[in-house]
Amino acid sequence: MGAAWRELGNKQNAFNHILDMVRGVNSMGLEVCCTLGMLTSEQAKQLKEAGLSAYNHNLDTSPEHYPKVITTRSYEDRLQTIANVRDAGISVCCGGILGLGEEDNDRVGLLHVLATLPEHPESVPINALVAVEGTPLGEEDDIDRVDAFDMARMIATARIVMPRTMVRLSAGRMSFSHAEQYLMFQAGANSIFNGDKLLTTANPEFDEDQAMFQKFGFRGKPAHKGPLLAPAESTGRVQITKYEAKKEQYA
C-alpha cells in the first residue's frame, strides 16, 4: 500500500485509516508492505503493532548523486526512516532506480550503502526509471539508456553482496520482453511487484505475470516465509560475512 506524500507527519486521521487497512490485510494471512514516505520511530512502532510485515523506502541512488536528483529530503532522512523501521522490528524493503543520469560508480555506491547497513534489507527493488511527463526527468528519455544488461548487472551484483536478500525486479518491467526479464531472473532476481499499478506507473496485469511465471517454471513462496538457503550456503561452501559502515559515512 502506498501514499504519494513526502511523510506521514501529523496526518493522524489518514494514519488511522492506514492502520485499519494494515490490520485488515494482515487478518487475511497475507504479508503487508507499505510505502508512506518518512516515518518517525513511534509511527513505525504503531505500524508494527497493526501487523505490518515490511516497509518500502528506497535510497534511489548513491549518496554522491542523490542531491542532483532529489531535494525534498536528505539522504540522511531516508537512512533515519530505514533505521526507525528496522528498530520497530519491521522488514526493510530498500533499493534504487537506474536511469537517473547516474554513472556506474553511483550504482556501485548505492549497493555499497545497502550492503553495509547494520542488517541487509530483506528486499531490494531494482527499478528502471519510467519517465513521467511534467517531471524534471520526464523530458529526457532516460529509460532507453537502461537496457536489460544494465538491469542484469545491477541485479547480479546485488545478489552477490546481499546473498539472502529478495532482489526485486520492479518498475520499468513493461519496457522489457519476457526473454529479457528471464535474463534478469537468471542473474539473481527472485521477486517482483505484482499487480497492474505501482504507486505512480503502470505494471503488467496479474494474469500476464502468472502466465509468464508458468512459462518460466517459477512458483511463488508462501506468505511469511523467507527465501530458501542457497545450496552453496547450506552446505557450508559459502560463508556469509557482514561488514558495517561507519556511522558518519553518509551524513
Image: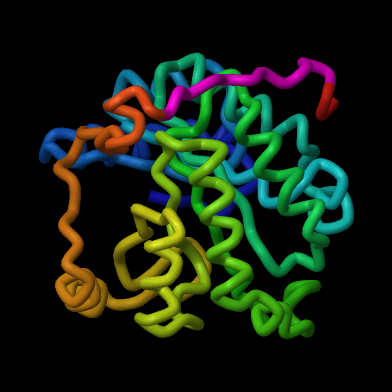
Q: Position of residue 3 (x, y in %)?
A: 49, 51
Is most of the magenta stretch helix, strand or loop?
Answer: loop
The span picked out in magenta is 238-248
- From what the image shows, is residue 210 above or below residue 110? below
Report whether 6 appears left or right of 67: left
Quadrant occupied by the C terminus? top right
Residue 250 seen from this side? yes
Q: In the picture provided, is 133 more to the left or to the right than 188?
A: right
User: Quarter-wise, where is residue 68 in the image?
Assistant: bottom right
* Residue 22 seen: no
Write the residue at 80% across / 38% down: 74
Q: Residue at x 33, y 72 (%)?
A: 196
Specify whether 14 is left or right of 25.
right
Left or right: where 236 falls relative to 169: left
Q: Give me the residue at 71% from left, 79% from top.
A: 145
Q: Position of residue 119 (x, y in %)?
A: 53, 22
> Residue placed farthest to the front in the image?
237
Q: Nearer the viewer, residue 79 or 101?
A: 101
| Residue in the picture at 29% in, 40% down | 32
Please state which of residues 77 and 177 is positioned toward the viewer in this rendering.
177
Looking at the picture, does residue 6 appear above or below residue 101?
A: above
Q: Report how many numbered discs are placed on residues in the image.
A: 0
In this rendering, the answer to whether 213 lies above or below 40 is below
List x then y, in percent, for residue 230: 31, 37
Residue 159: % across, % down = 49, 45
